[in-house]
Image (tube, rainbow, N blue to C red):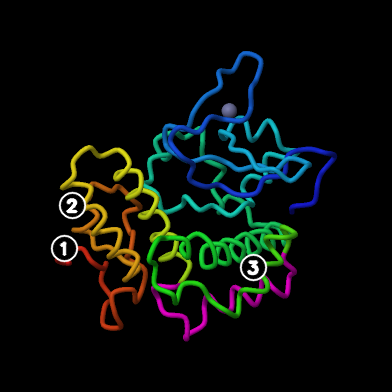
Amino acid sequence: MTQAQDGGWIPVRKDFVDLDTRCHARGNSRRHHGFPTGQAYILRDPAGHEYPFGEDCARAAVLHAGLLAQVPDYTERDVVSRLAEPGNLPPPARARRPTAAQAEAAQRAAAIRYLVLRMEKAAAVPRVQPTVRFAPLEAVYEQYQRTGEITTAQVRRILAIERSPTTPPRLRATNLLDVYTAHIKLERLIAASNSVDNIRFLRSLHDWLARHLVLSTAQLAAAGIEMHPQAFGSPGVWGPEDAAPAGSTGSLF
Ligand SMILES: [Zn+2]
């Protein structure tokens, strides 16, 4: 997936970017646009440097547009607004059964996403609880950073760790995506706020998130964070007895 292809751009991931980021593509008639939703495709050039691209620009830059659908997507738990833009949606997955190669690519993307979430993105949240960074994944993470590759055996092992009964629900992929997404959104709100009281409140929520790896629906609403409708509602994250959509009636703290 990450081999250099004829010196072209290699899609690496879909991720959040700073709101003042500009697209790296500078087409003839195209303005050098920004990213109003704060999401971009990150592509790697032949020299190994990574740059942000809008979706259309990324499609134009890569060898096959289908490659964009195979990268780890770290923005999946953001608020679902792209449904309003039908032109932006890939064909429904159920329309065609995935080929073996597509299924393998999806597994690989899921494994890389979990590895990077656990060892880098959620682990980098300030004061995050130390259980996030997982010692048995250190070697494969270091290798992935160095080479951009993981083997099929490593894909299986990473996915097995994610699904293991010994992995707490709050450390599974979807909840870590929720943590990463809420972290990004809290940082943006803190950066944009002029009110000392509001910043203090947002920081307290951020600390809570870092310690507990969850925010309740009430906390999200109080902060003004829009996320996926099931954010922090993955099975088990609110405790073993919790089966209903979690946190919807949770108190603020
Ligand atoms: Zn662009």
User: Would you name the residue on which mark 2 appears?
Assistant: 222
Indicate yes or no: mark 2 CB to ligand 1 under 8 Å.
no
Question: In the image, which disc is placed on residue 141?
Answer: 3
> Would residue 64 be found to the left or right of residue 31 on screen?
right
Where in the figure is residue 191, as x and y percent of width and height?
33, 41
Tag 3: amino acid:
Tyr
Q: Secondary structure at mark 2?
A: helix
Q: Where the C terminus falls, by quadrant?
A: bottom left
Indicate yes or no: mark 1 CB to ligand 1 under 8 Å.
no
Q: Nearer the viewer, mark 1 or mark 3?
A: 3
Question: In the image, which disc is placed on residue 252?
Answer: 1
> Would residue 1 be found to the left or right of residue 40 on screen?
right
Where in the figure is residue 233, as x and y percent of width and height?
32, 66
Q: Are marks 1 and 2 in contact (CB under 8 Å)?
A: yes
Q: Secondary structure at mark 3?
A: helix
Q: Nearer the viewer, mark 3 or mark 2?
A: 3
Nearest the eye: 88 or 98: 88
| Magenta-colored stretch includes residue 169 | yes
State the image quarter where residue 107 is shown: bottom right
